[in-house]
Amino acid sequence: MGDGNNGSSAAKGFGINDVVAGISVAALLIPQSLAYGSLAGMPAYHGLYAAMLPPIVAAFFASSPYLQTGPVAITSLLTFGALAPLAAVGSSEFVLLAALLALVVGITRVTLGLVRGGWVSYLMSQPVVIGFTNAAAILIIASQLPSALGTQAGSGSLMSNALWAVTHPGQWGVAALVLSVLTIGLVLGGTRITQLFPAVLIAVVAGVAFSTVSGYSGRIVGEIPAGLPPFSVAFPWGSLPALIVPGIVIALVGFAEPAAIARTLAARERQMWSPDQELVSQGAANLAAAISGGFPVGGSFSRTALNHLSGGRTRWSGAVTGVAILMFLPVAGILSPLPTAILGAIVISAVLKLIRFGPMVTLVRHSVLQAGVAWTTFVATLAMAPRIERGVLVGVGLAVLVHLWRELRLDVQVTVDEAGVTLKPTGVLYFGSAPGLNETLFGVLAAHPEENRVTIDLSLVARIDYTGALALKDAAEWADNAGFRLRIRGVPPPARTNVIKVFGPGSPFLEDS
């Protein structure tokens, strides 16, 4: 996979900077993993399990030397959406289903990587990604508002619970609200000072201290089992059919972020990067999550940036992160008093930057069709929550339909002057669009019965397949039989072979054959 020298060069380059970077990322990932575990509908400490083994395993296969793997916000929300209809949130059954879902995601990504399917990282159109990301960010924030405000989540939808929490200030926990506001202010303010400011770590340490000293009465993380997670391959196989589609969607959607991160850093550092190898790496990480009490994981933008800024230069810094969390597990109980309001605020701070309506508004000015794809994906994702993977499917389906419609539609410029009738099509002439050219030709000739000279100028046609060439010949023969003198010019060089095969060498219909 990828560059055969990648592993050896990475191993030789491993040094103290990678250790420092890996530990720095672990300090951020520990509280984030608890927050994302809760967001995924799991007992929060399962986030630590998803942050332990996956980055270690990913390091052995990774193409990017910087990418940090573990729980991430959007994948966690997708996990919650896929599993919430199947089991009680937070139950042991839910935990087992999450492991099985990670297995599906892992197998999908490894398979795609092995068959060189890395091109899927470019497959999702930007309008779909923009619409889905904005909607997902809103839903993530909505899911955390009850915790941040110190209210009960309730049994309604994500949006209805958030609306209830916001509109019932009498139910807010004052301490929880203050902790949330201080955490968000600390994270956002600290980031403006420097990306290396340990705002999340400070918030967590202060929150644990406050909770312990004050006897905080709000919701806290609670008991965190000491030691290693329960390694198991006892998956609930009977539920596999219900998880295949969500697993494939998570595998594809969840790979878009790490692919973009790795691609950007590779370009910036002038390094090679292999999406196929990264798919295998991310797939292996999910297989590791599946057997270690975790849930689907992916590449994190914020932690990858921190890894890079902290001096990480080889893929083994990710392994250091996993080892650091492994060493933390025996004492993870020190986080038990941590108020969940702080976890909610950490998640909100992390996804606020994902809300970007500017590109969606700009799309309206540049392409109404593409804007329609983005806004439809946005609305569908919100409307179908928590099954937000269905919003992705709606967006992808609409994007495909728009593409097909545009491919079927051949724009034809018609000119009538002393030289006769000239048709100048623009686009791709293939089996889907060829009938449109013929219909335009017939319509123009019917509207101008006095004209008997017709020219079809193909200089603006990008491609002509065999069926398109046959349609051209049918149109030429029809015009000839009807008494018109039809000539075809400007056949694009790549299509000339097909056209000459269909018309025959020296055809009187072809001006430049």
Image (cartoon, grey):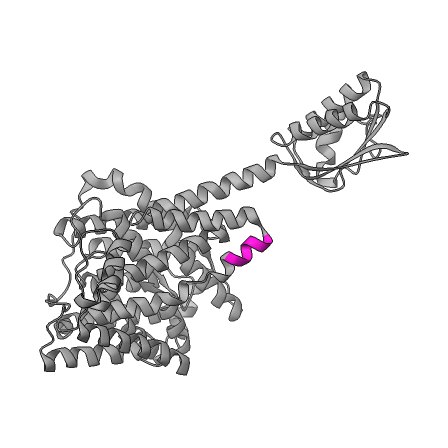
Q: Position of residue 481 (x, y in %)?
A: 80, 16
Of 426 and 474, the residue lying toward us: 426
Q: How many marks?
A: 0
198 relative to 166, above or below: below
Q: Position of residue 10 (x, y in %)?
A: 41, 69
Residue lying at 22% horizontally and 45% vertically, measured from the top left: 85
Question: Would residue 424 be seen by someone viewing this image from the given angle?
Answer: yes
Residue 306 is inside the magenta segment: no
Q: Position of residue 475 (x, y in %)?
A: 74, 24
| Residue positioned most to the right | 418
Q: Main secondary structure of the magenta part?
A: helix
Q: Quadrant of residue 8?
A: bottom left
Q: Quadrant of residue 328?
A: bottom left
Stretch of the chain drawn in magenta: 361-366
Quadrant containing the C terminus in the rendered view: top right
Residue lying at 32% horizontally and 78% vertically, measured from the top left: 185
163 relative to 448, above or below: below
| Residue positioned most to the top | 481
Q: Position of residue 271 (x, y in %)?
A: 51, 67
Question: Would residue 117 be seen by someone viewing this image from the given angle?
Answer: no
Of 150 and 331, the residue lying toward us: 150
3 relative to 209, above or below: above
Quadrant containing the N terminus in the rendered view: bottom left
424 relative to 471, above or below: below
Q: Is residue 179 left or right of residue 428?
A: left
